[in-house]
Amino acid sequence: MSRIGKMPVVIPAGVDVTVDGNLVTAKGPKGTLSCNIHPNITVEKDCDTIKVTRPNDDKQNRSLHGLSRTLIANMIHGVNETFKKELEVNGVGYRAELKGKELVLKVGFSHDVIMTAPEGVTIEVPAPNKIVISGADKQKVGQFAANVREKRPPEPYKGKGIKYVEEHIRRKEGKAGKGGK
């Protein structure tokens, strides 16, 4: 049995979850999310819990069991409290700013990199070297944060680039001086 899949998902107060066949919809103070669950997986709603079960121990059903439970748990968490990713911009002259709903990155190119957030994702720039991306959908928040980081990933020699706040960059030593005589 899947350790993750067999745990019930607790529905917090203020969140309304409806199960209509394979479509699970969660409504909460931060928005509404819905997800189609694979037809092999059964989703049952009790009073304040959701239980996810699988029909048998086939390899595909085992893999879908934990995934489906996690997707539902992430939806419920997202409509109750938002997901957040924080990015840090390191480098001389590197900075970020917000113009309307567009994120403008000045990261060493001859032009500014302009990125617009997908619907349901909000961008904040509290400081020129800090970007906060938040939203109810964990997948959209994570993907947009990865797209921002991709524009100038951190390099190992000077540490310049865009990195996650909790990310540690393994630094390399530069060229070694000429040894010997």
Image: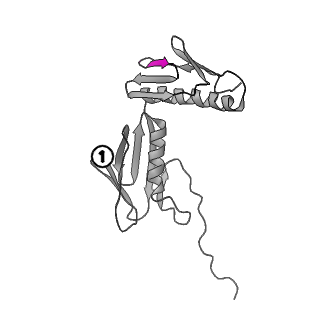
Tell me if residue 17 is in the magenta stretch. Answer: yes
- 17 sits left or right of 111 in the view: right
Name the outermost residue toward the top. 47
Quarter of the figure with the C terminus? bottom right
Residue 180 lies in quadrant: bottom right
Residue 84 lies in quadrant: top left
Q: Residue at x 54, y 27 (%)?
A: 37
Name the outermost residue toward the front. 39
Which residues are drawn in magenta?
14-21
Q: Residue at x 54, y 12 (%)?
A: 46
- As drawn, 122 above or below 97: above
Across and down, in percent, residue 28 comes to 40, 23
- As drawn, 102 above or below 94: above
- As drawn, 149 above or below 179: above
Q: Dot 1, how many residues are within 10 Å of its Cα: few (below 14), some (14-19), or many (20+)? A: few
* Residue closest to the eye, 28 or 64: 64
* Residue closest to the eye, 68 or 122: 68
Name the outermost residue toward the bottom. 181
Q: Amino acid at mark 1?
A: Lys
Quarter of the figure with the N terminus? top right
Element carrying mark 1: loop
Q: Which residue is mark 1?
A: 101
Q: Residue at x 38, y 43 (%)?
A: 118
